[in-house]
Image: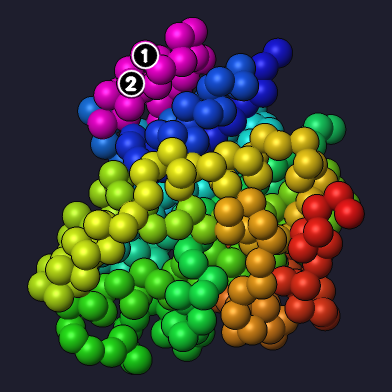
Amino acid sequence: MSELAVVTGASGGIGEQIAAGLARTGATVVLVARDRTRLDLARGRIREAVPGADLETEPVDLANLAEVRALADRLGERVPSIVVSNAAVIAPLDDRTPDGFHRTLVTNHLAPYLLLRRLAERPTGRPRRFVVVGGSPRGLTRVPVELDDLNLEAGRGLGWPPSFRPFVAYARTKNMNAMFVYALASRLAGTGTTVNGAHPGIIRGGRLDRHDRGALKVFGSLCGLFAAGTETGADTPLWLATADEVEGVTGGFFVKRRAVETAPHTTAPERVERLWRESARLVGLPADAGRPVADTPPGARPAANPRG
């Protein structure tokens, strides 16, 4: 039986490239994204690039927590051995889901939190790898998560000009990704399930900038002049999902296949635990399930030197 792999945000860009790489290993790959038409097109492109690829599609709106729960239930019955959480969005600040959440918060953080936690609860006798695609540790140092305002009710500290504020909100969710990696990896230590994060780099060819306006749109266009392609962006997440040299490595954050430290505000145990508990409350899961977060900074762990 082939491995079952899941990739969110797989209807294009980095996600499509990760899915194609997993298909080349012979895995059955489940492509998850909101738009059914774009998913079908991505499946066709992957099958052209990887003849015989075993692909399935799951059209799911990751900004809808009810759909995420249902997806977790369907996938949980099959116990995937690889899950790459890649989907992300930069949404306008007034873009709220029917549940009242900012779309960026749900898509980028609450959805992977809910999906991976629910999947982690399923027992398995096989090793599993969870990979969360985050952001630049260096670039995010000055954008700590506002733990008192995860859902941007007050909108504190989003800065100037106004057109950049959606990007700041997005950047905070990328720091949440790192914090979630450390918290989940700590709770799953010794279970055979590894959890790692990766920064893909500044990449062109995706749709992350589709809502950009004003100065942010200009800034994004300039960055695009120096950006790498989607294959480059997919490299480190795909490596974490498949490479023998990182087997058993967990709780790390990687850039260009190298373990790196993230900002102290993402590794402080009290902040990591507080984000975990608040996220649990928002998605309706018990906060105390699983092992507690370690008392030492989660970022300082064996992943800094995989396999010695």
177 left or right of 182 in image: left
Q: Residue at x 60, y 80 (%)?
A: 263
How many numbered marks, from 0 up? Answer: 2
Q: Residue at x 67, y 17 (%)?
A: 2
Secondary structure state at the residue bearing disc 2: helix
56 left or right of 92 in image: right
Q: Which mark is on residue 45? A: 2
On whether residue 51 falls in the magenta region, the answer is: yes
User: Which of 213/36 is in front?
Assistant: 213
Q: How is the image coloured?
A: rainbow
Local crowd size for mark 2, using a 10 Å CA cut-off: few (<14), some (14–19), many (≥20): some
Q: Determine contact: label 2, label 1, CB under 8 Å.
A: yes
User: Which of 226/48 is in front?
Assistant: 226
In the rendered view, would you say 169 is above or below 27?
A: below
Magenta residues (range): 38-58
How far from the left and from the top, in percent, is residue 175? 51, 72
In the rendered view, would you say 220 is above or below 74?
A: below
217 left or right of 85 in image: left
Residue designated by label 1: 48
Name the residue type under label 2.
Answer: Arg
Residue found at the far top of this picture: 52
In the rendered view, would you say 151 is above or below 192?
A: below
Q: Quadrant of residue 32?
A: top left
On whether residue 72 falls in the magenta region, the answer is: no
Q: Residue at x 78, y 41 (%)?
A: 245
Q: CA distance from mark 2 to mark 1?
A: 5 Å
Q: Quadrant of the C terminus?
A: bottom right
Can residue 265 be seen in this snapshot?
Answer: yes
Name the residue type under label 1.
Answer: Glu
